[in-house]
Image (cartoon, grey):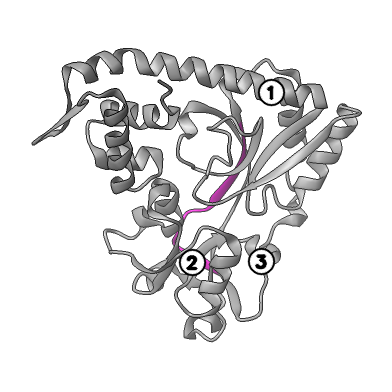
Amino acid sequence: MDVDTRLLRSFVAVAEEGTLTRAAERLFVSQPALTKQIRQLEAQLGARLFTRSRTGMALTEPGRVLSGRAPALLAEWDRVLRETRSAAGRAARVLRVGFMASAANEATPRIIADFTRRRPGWRVDMRQAAWSHPSAGLADGEVDVALLRLPFPGQDALRTEVLFTEDRWVALPAGHPLAARDVIPFRDLWDEPFVAAPPETGWWREHWLATDEREGHPVRIGAVTDQPDDWLSAIANGYGMALAPASAARFYARPGITYRPVSGVSPSRVGVAWSRADDTDPVVRDFVRCCLDNRPRPEESPI
């Protein structure tokens, strides 16, 4: 019998977190979807793995046996998968780089050009990820290195270096009364509807809603999107507004949308991330060095 590793990962998350709610947040899936996966695994194994209690999900005896072995099994599979994919890339002289939205802004072409000079014959395969995958495929071994917005879920398990910091602005419908202001205090946005990332993205979503900087004021959600084009359409159509990196005013300019600076909210950071297992990989190290050597110049600031 073959068991889907996705089901084992769901089981391990519930076993370690102790509740479906926390496990769903960790896995970036909905709670009903996670419940379905646990039931699938139980059906395949022919054993009940959890019982519900007042404090959460308690392991049964078969569940305890599986929880003792599954983490090591998954870690070994991840290592094999990562090494196999990495070997395929090395054989083809391709470095897979995941990225979110505009990546490292204007520095991205310089980073790639510098890398190809250091590694003649190598090619950088840039792979854009949806917001529902804020590690841009790095956590799943789909890419070798990633250019990301910090913080992102799972960041603590990876290596990261901050490349630069930029202010968070607000993107809002051009006809909105606040669009006429030069700078908008964040407090003035608290009662406005916001366009948000999917709930399963957890604290990535919370960061871009600035939930922790609202002094307990609840967030109004006007729309949920997972791709830049859908995000822009939702804002232009008046479903809500959204915090965005200041550089979005350059990379995502669109009729019907106005970008304005916001005061009273913390900035956004852009970083490069890679797996701890690749600390000694010379190709990954070269790319990281290129990122650090080609940080945006002061004149590229959107201010």
Q: Tell me the amino acid under the disc marked 2.
A: Ala
Q: Earlier in the sequence, mark 3 or mark 2?
A: 2
SS type, badge 3 = loop
**Disc 3 vs disc 1: which is toward the camera?**
1
Residue 66 spot, x, y in % from top left: 29, 17
Q: What span is in magenta?
A: 261-273
Position of 238 relative to 271 (above/below): below
Tell me the number on the disc at residue 252: 3
Q: CA distance from mark 2 to mark 1?
A: 37 Å
> Is residue 161 within the magenta segment?
no
Amino acid found under the numbered disc labelled 1: Ser
Q: Left or right of 240: which side holds 217?
A: left
Q: Are marks 3 and 1 in contact (CB under 8 Å)?
A: no
Question: Residue 242, which numbered label?
Answer: 2
Q: Position of residue 110 (x, y in %)?
A: 82, 44
Q: Which residue carries the number 1 mark? A: 86
- How many labels, in total? 3
In the image, taking residue 52 as reference, residue 110 lies left or right, namely: right
Residue 48 to residue 203: above or below: above
Residue at the (56%, 73%) spot, across then down: 233
Sequence order check, earlier mark of 3 and 1: 1
214 vs 182, nearest the viewer: 214
Q: Which residue is found at the position 16% from the left and 21% from the top?
A: 60
Please tell me whether mark 1 sits on a helix, a strand or a loop: helix
Q: Is residue 259 left or right of residue 105?
A: left
